[in-house]
Image: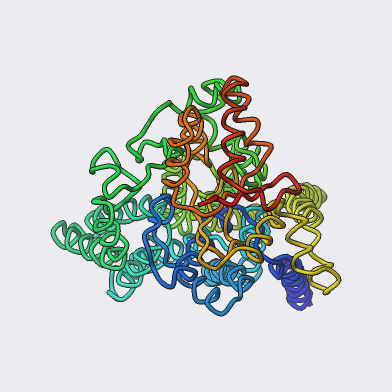
Amino acid sequence: MEILQSNRINLFIQTLLAVAILLLYFIVIVIALTPPIARDALIHHLAVPKLWLVNGGFYEIKWADFSYYPMNIDLLYLISLYFNNDILPNFIHMGFGIGTAWIIYRYLNRHFTRVAGLLGVLVFVSTPIVLRMSTVAYVDLGLAFFTTVSVLAFIHWRTGSYEGFKWLLISSIAMGLALGTKYNALIAWVFLSFSVVFLYSRDTGEQWRAIRYGLIFFLVSLCLFSPWLIKNLILTGNPLYPLFKGLFTAGINNVAPDGSARSMVSGEVYMGMFRLREMLYGESFWETLLIPVRFFFQGEDYSGRYFNGVLNPILILLVPFAFMKRSLHGDKLFFVLFSVFFILASFFLDQLHIRYILPAIPFLAILTVMGIMNIFAWTSEKRGPSRFVYVCIILLFLLTLGAGNVIYLNKYFQGLQPANYVLNLETRDAYLKRHIRSYAAIGYINSHTPPNARIRLLFLARRGYYLNRIYEDDATYGMDVMRGLAANAGEEGSFRKYLGSLGCTHLLIRMDLFNKFLRDNYPPETIDLLLRLLDTKTETIYHADGYAVYRLIP
């Protein structure tokens, strides 16, 4: 009778978890059915493939450092864009998240129970940053997927007493695909390459074979990564461009340097992180030093100070409880070391974004579930009223933390308001105008300029995806162009020559930032002179909603 009751409770919990997962994905799918509005999709992940298509094939986009990043997943988006579908990329990216969740389920189900597997899926997919990434055409979930496959394949090879060479090969291939997805995979590559050598040598005592296997892992991964390295080497002289500029010839072939790159790997460290955050946000040394922990407590979307993303504290609060039992101690320790190494290494990147540590989240989710299972196993050993009290306290704690994820998803959904578009109560153009202020101006350019027009963006932060014309921008968002215009405003011929040197037929300008930049940097006389020359050398063909389109007069 007790066994039957236990099975019913187990089935009820499984059903509850499965329903929660399906409800989450129902909401996520509704959001993903909307057109792209996410920043990096409009700047990079969809914009670069579209520029290639508009150009009729690959070409070097010298003004965009991000066009030199590895683009395995972006190539999948290119296929979708070729068929004029820019919503499918949202689902491609979501698919990598689902794949990662499936791997988590398989691992926990194999070592614990189906309940543990489903709980692992719920912990992972309900994490706010995973929810948001599942609705946009980025690449971070792809990186998390390939990294998770690589790490768990290596773990499987190790726990199988290093039999079955195919698992090392799978791990190597997955790592190579991760490297071809995003440069952040270099962190995992370094960690796993050394882990293969160190752990094999320690476990077997065969040092030379350990080095051989380490080289196999390293070289197989490198081979899959190499097409992007070769491309960058040919174009810039730096295979890892725009990283490590100090080690290679910078700016070769007139590649425009990205003024935003200021990390320890960029070769352009202009200001220390501690000093920069003190200047920008008034943070103390200790506040900055604790950022790897603050990731889990203080995240906020669209906030540079709070890391442009949201996690859940449960991902670190319950990790210590995973070690209450000695089982799978080697796996647990490896997951902790990998996660800590990845998070700390990401801490030194030029921009502190929570999505940059996504490859660590699957392993923290696994450890969190291990902790939960151990805690409930401990409570099951209690007798009397204390057992009920402990269970209630634990459930209340878990539900409180889980409620944060639900609140986040509701806020995210309400902010986008996708239902009207999905139900065909709102047009695509109306939805995009509601979320992208420049969309009307971009639509005008697409409708009223010749197909061979070339557009120069000023103060649009490189968001050019919806332009159906070749366009250019730069790392200063147009400030360098403004400086050039101001410097040549003293003489009409020089001003005309500088405009011609931009190589464009039209200017698309965000006017509030345009005017603010002029007021903040130049005296009224220079501003008046510049605007007067701009009026004579260009024609204003559109001006509305804070954006203007100027046609250069030949």
Seen from the viewer's position, the closer of residues 301 and 81 is: 81
Q: Residue at x 29, y 66 (%)?
A: 227
- Residue at 49 percent across and 72 percent down: it is 78
Left or right: 401 as drawn, with respect to 328: right
Q: Position of residue 29 (x, y in %)?
A: 71, 70
Can residue 373 be seen? no
Instruction: Please state the horizontal and vertical placement of residue 291, each as a whole percent of the image.
Output: 54, 34
**Residue 282 visible in this rendered orientation of the protein:** yes
Residue 384 to residue 344: above or below: below
Viewer-proximal residue, 33 or 431? 431
Farthest residue toward the right? Answer: 425
From the top left corner, tell me how far across and down residue 19 is, in percent. Answer: 76, 71
Name, please, the residue furthest toward the left: 208
The quadrant where residue 528 appears: top right
Identified at 79% across, 53% down, the residue is 415
Seen at 29% across and 61% down, the residue is: 231
> Residue 436, located in which quarter of the rendered image?
bottom right
